[in-house]
Image (cartoon, helix red, strand yellow):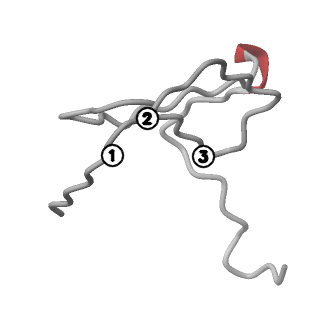
Amino acid sequence: MRMTVNNKCIQVGELVIEGVGSSSLVLVGDANVITSSSYFDTPASSFVQSLEVPLPPENETP
């Protein structure tokens, strides 16, 4: 996607951020490239990494 925005004269004196949603971007000024990244604040103790997928037996109805 290509987009051109012409912000003539813009001044930002102060920026206060009270909270952040699940998908947030704050951009003040110009940017040639915006790179997406993510951060999970889930504690390591609740994260389970395994190659096995827990599936119920075929003859069992959920």
- Residue at the image point whose x is 72% and y is 42% from the top: 21
Q: Is 58 left or right of 9, judged from the image as shown?
A: right
Question: Split into 4 quadrants, where in the image is the C terminus?
Answer: bottom right
Q: Which mark is residue 38?
A: none
At mark 3, the secondary structure is loop
Relative vertical location of residue 13 with respect to residue 18 in this rendering, above or below: above
Q: Nearer the viewer, residue 28 or 35?
A: 28
Total marks placed: 3
Q: In the rendered image, which residue does mark 3 sit on? A: 23
Relative to 37, is 4 above or below?
below
Spot occupied by residue 22 in the image (x, y as percentages of width and height): 68, 44
CB atoms at circles 2 and 3 under 8 Å apart? Answer: no
State the separation of the CA atoms marked 2 and 3: 25 Å
Q: Amino acid at mark 3?
A: Ser
Residue wearing tag 2 = 10
Disc 2 is placed on an element classified as loop
